[in-house]
Image (cartoon, grey):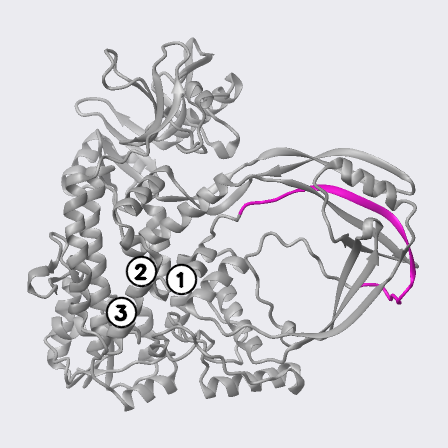
């Protein structure tokens, strides 16, 4: 057996580290956390100083058994989990579970998995930092208290199966507030005037410094423009520079990978984890923008050798985030001379993004020349044209940061050679009707940016928070087709003014985070009754408290006690006094029966209800379509929903129907159901006979291919083709078919034998 046992949290990391240590070291993985708060109860003994009650996870019992055995034979145990609070907590849990003394057990940390870094860490071990551990415990316990106490209130007052979370619920609040801002927005139109001037053989565009509210005003302006004498009144040329962005932190990497590569936040973190564990980049959870002296020197060498000395400029960026000192460096390549690495396509793309950003941060400013041209116009107004010329590329040779701004109309390109007082002629002047737009919905990247600005959450929390919001269906990724909108354009050519009506699509939105009806109802309930928990400043203060605990300034149990003293009494008050929250909204009355129609949240989602529980007849319910919302559905739209299910026509002598069920819109033919997808342009209210027939025949064909064999009798046994291969179905139970089995040769008896022998598939 090896004298030294090194325990890390992932097999990939173990494999990389093992290559840097000699034969006297064995490297094993704990496969992440080996224990957590018990699942059965709250897992926190509130009466005894918020003492956490931990248990080893079921799937980690064998790993713990193996590690205990290895620890008993090793002379020295080294705990080498990640360097942040989560990693420190993993090390402490390992020590506690494996019977190691936290006060003397060797704890080593490294920001990158390189031979130099590993050997340096082994040469200078420390012990477990309990301040960091307690900061992580405080976060875990506080989140459990909030979730465990708040969720049952939501079950009683809103709907079963809901959950609340400290950072999660604040994030949903941001989405809801932005959505309501969009819904309340009244778009206004104005005419934007753009002239095309010619200067010799070259044409350039200039925009008027005022917009006209009415078509008549724009028309009058164009009429005056035809006889106006144009010349250059102002010509200002200024040198300018552009500086590179800092190296990546966790949040800026998440934002830029979303903008440039289209990666969801969770995907970015998974790929970054792989790159780190393979030794390609430094630790990927960090608030720091600092680079080590070695990294600065390596970056400079790479820049000088690849681009020349004039492109190199050593820069030291300062970290603003409190608590960032626990993570020593920004995310950077471990070897600056490697512009690409092995691995799959996504690993290569993310690595190259990190490499370019790091290299660019140590490069010279880009030197620009900005030109602003002013041209007088009728009514004392003027046109402005802006141009930009790059005189020295600097860092732009490698990298330019993207932006979330979706409303940039101003374009800067090269202007032709111009001179002061130069007379100009226009080729055409356009007055185009433009509409104001509301703030954009949050993308994953822009939500991370906003949370970071507010001081809510930390690098390790952003990806799981967004994942939870979507998983709990508090928000969905938008898939709005939008609608066509007409706009007017007036064009002056020579002395003639022409007018035409054009069309544009407005309201289309893809892949943005959009709160659902249940997300809005839950948010409103929590804001009304637990405003302090959802307050942005309070949530940011809690993060500061965690930082102070990590720095040894605050006792973690005292911090929890201060929170819980106010939180728990409010829970009791709300449970006793608060009414039920259904997000109910009155739409009006049914023209035929005179009964009221309301939109609200029901057991399986948002519905419209015709009539009330007090009526002699039971009320009728109809589910909302995917793109309909409780807050915006109209009475007319609700009445159409009550027409469902509707008979579309006949197919093979049977009725063909369309409706909305628990799992969404469908068409039905006998016992066969086929889903209707809004993304295909279909909905149950307007779908026609031809399209419905097409969907039913396609579903019938898919089901036929799915069914391999059917054995009649008691019970009926089927062999079906599933997502993961063939399986046996008996009633509602599914049973595995072992790999390598000749499925075509299976008869009823063979199926019964497999059912009796093998375990049932997990639901």
Question: Can residue 191 be found in the magenta stretch?
Answer: no
Q: Which residue is mark 1?
A: 454
- Is residue 479 or residue 345 the one in the foreground? 479
Image coordinates of residue 561 in percent, x first then y, are 15, 64
Taking the view exactly as shown, the residue that stands out farthest to the bottom is: 123
Which of the marked residues, 2 or 3, is nearer the chain's N terminus?
Answer: 2
Q: Quadrant of the C terminus?
A: top left
Distance Cα–Cα, label 1 vs label 2:
9 Å
Question: Can residue 435 be found in the magenta stretch?
Answer: yes
The magenta segment: 415-438
Q: Secondary structure at mark 2?
A: helix
Image coordinates of residue 655 in percent, x first then y, are 41, 12
* Quadrant in the rendering for residue 66: bottom left
Q: Which residue is mark 3?
A: 546
Image marks 3 and 1: residues in contact by CB distance under 8 Å: no
Image coordinates of residue 175 in percent, x first then y, are 41, 48
Image coordinates of residue 8 in percent, x first then y, are 26, 74
Image marks 1 and 2: residues in contact by CB distance under 8 Å: yes
Q: Secondary structure at mark 3?
A: helix
Q: Which residue is mark 2?
A: 539
């Amino acid at each position: 057996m090896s004298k030294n046992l090194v325990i890390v949290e992932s097999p990939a990391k173990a494999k990389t580290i093992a290559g840097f240590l000699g034969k006297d070291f064995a490297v094993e993985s704990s496969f992440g956390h080996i224990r957590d708060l018990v699942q059965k109860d709250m897992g926190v003994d509130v009466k005894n100083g918020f003492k956490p009650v931990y248990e080893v996870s079921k799937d980690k019992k064998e790993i713990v058994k193996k590690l205990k055995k290895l620890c008993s034979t090793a002379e020295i145990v080294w705990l080498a989990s990640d360097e942040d609070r989560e990693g420190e907590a993993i090390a402490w849990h390992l020590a506690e579970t494996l019977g190691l003394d936290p006060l003397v057990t060797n704890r080593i940390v490294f920001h990158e998995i390189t031979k130099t870094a590993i050997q340096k860490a082994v040469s200078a071990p420390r012990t477990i930092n309990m301040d960091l551990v307690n900061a992580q415990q405080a976060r875990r316990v506080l989140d459990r208290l909030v979730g465990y106490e708040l969720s049952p209130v939501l079950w009683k007052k809103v709907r079963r199966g809901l959950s609340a979370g400290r950072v999660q619920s604040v994030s949903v609040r941001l989405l809801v507030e932005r959505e309501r801002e969009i819904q309340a927005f009244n778009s206004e139109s104005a005419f934007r005037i753009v002239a095309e001037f010619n200067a010799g053989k070259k044409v350039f565009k200039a925009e008027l410094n005022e917009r006209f509210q009415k078509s008549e005003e724009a028309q009058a302006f164009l009429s005056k423009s035809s006889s106006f004498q144009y010349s250059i009144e102002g010509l200002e040329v200024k040198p300018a520079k552009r500086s590179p962005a800092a190296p990546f932190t966790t949040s800026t990497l998440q934002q830029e990978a979303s903008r440039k590569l289209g990666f969801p936040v969770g995907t970015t973190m998974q790929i970054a984890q792989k790159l780190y564990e393979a030794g390609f980049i430094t630790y990927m959870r960090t608030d720091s923008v600092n680079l080590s002296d070695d990294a600065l020197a390596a970056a400079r060498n790479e820049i000088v050798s690849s681009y020349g000395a004039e492109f190199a400029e050593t820069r030291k960026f300062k970290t603003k985030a409190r608590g960032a000192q626990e993570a020593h460096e920004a995310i950077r390549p471990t070897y600056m001379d490697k512009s690409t690495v092995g691995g799959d396509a996504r690993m290569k793309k993310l690595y190259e993004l990190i490499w370019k950003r790091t290299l660019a941060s140590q490069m010279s400013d880009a030197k620009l020349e900005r030109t602003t041209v002013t041209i007088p116009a009728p009514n004392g107004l003027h046109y402005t044209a802006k141009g930009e010329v790059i005189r020295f590329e600097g860092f732009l040779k490698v990298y330019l940061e993207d932006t979330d701004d979706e409303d940039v109309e101003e374009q800067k390109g090269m202007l032709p050679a111009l001179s002061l007082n130069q007379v100009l002629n226009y080729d055409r002047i356009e007055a185009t009707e433009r509409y104001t737009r509301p703030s954009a919905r949050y993308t994953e990247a822009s939500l991370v940016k906003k949370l970071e600005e507010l001081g809510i959450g930390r690098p390790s929390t952003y990806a799981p928070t967004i994942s939870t919001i979507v998983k709990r269906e508090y928000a969905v990724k938008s898939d709005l087709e939008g609608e066509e909108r007409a706009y007017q354009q007036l064009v002056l050519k020579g002395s003639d003014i022409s007018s035409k009506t054009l069309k544009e699509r407005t309201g289309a939105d893809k892949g943005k985070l959009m709160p659902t009806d249940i997300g809005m109802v839950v948010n409103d309930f929590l804001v009304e009754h637990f405003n302090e928990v959802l307050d942005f400043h309070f949530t940011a203060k809690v993060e500061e408290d965690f930082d102070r605990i990590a720095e040894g300034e605050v006792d973690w149990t005292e911090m929890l006690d201060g929170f819980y003293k106010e939180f728990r009494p409010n829970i009791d008050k709300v449970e006793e006094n608060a009414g039920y929250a259904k997000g109910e909204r009155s739409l009006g009355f049914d023209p035929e029966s005179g009964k009221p129609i309301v939109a609200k949240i029901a057991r399986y989602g948002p519905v419209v209800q015709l009539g009330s529980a007090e009526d002699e007849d039971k009320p009728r319910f109809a589910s909302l379509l995917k793109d309909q919302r409780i807050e915006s559905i109209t009475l007319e739209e609700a009445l159409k929903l009550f027409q469902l299910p509707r008979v579309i026509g006949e197919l093979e002598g049977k009725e063909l129907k369309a409706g909305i069920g628990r799992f969404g819109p469908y068409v039905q033919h006998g016992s066969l159901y086929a889903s209707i997808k809004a993304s295909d342009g279909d909905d149950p209210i307007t779908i026609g006979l031809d399209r419905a027939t097409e969907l039913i025949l396609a579903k019938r064909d898919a089901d036929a291919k799915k069914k391999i064999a059917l054995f009649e009798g008691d019970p009926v046994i089927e062999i079906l083709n599933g997502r993961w291969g063939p399986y046996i179905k008996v009633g509602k139970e599914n049973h595995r078919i072992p790999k390598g089995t000749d499925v075509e040769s299976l008869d009823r008896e063979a199926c019964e034998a497999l059912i009796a022998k093998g375990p049932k598939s997990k639901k």
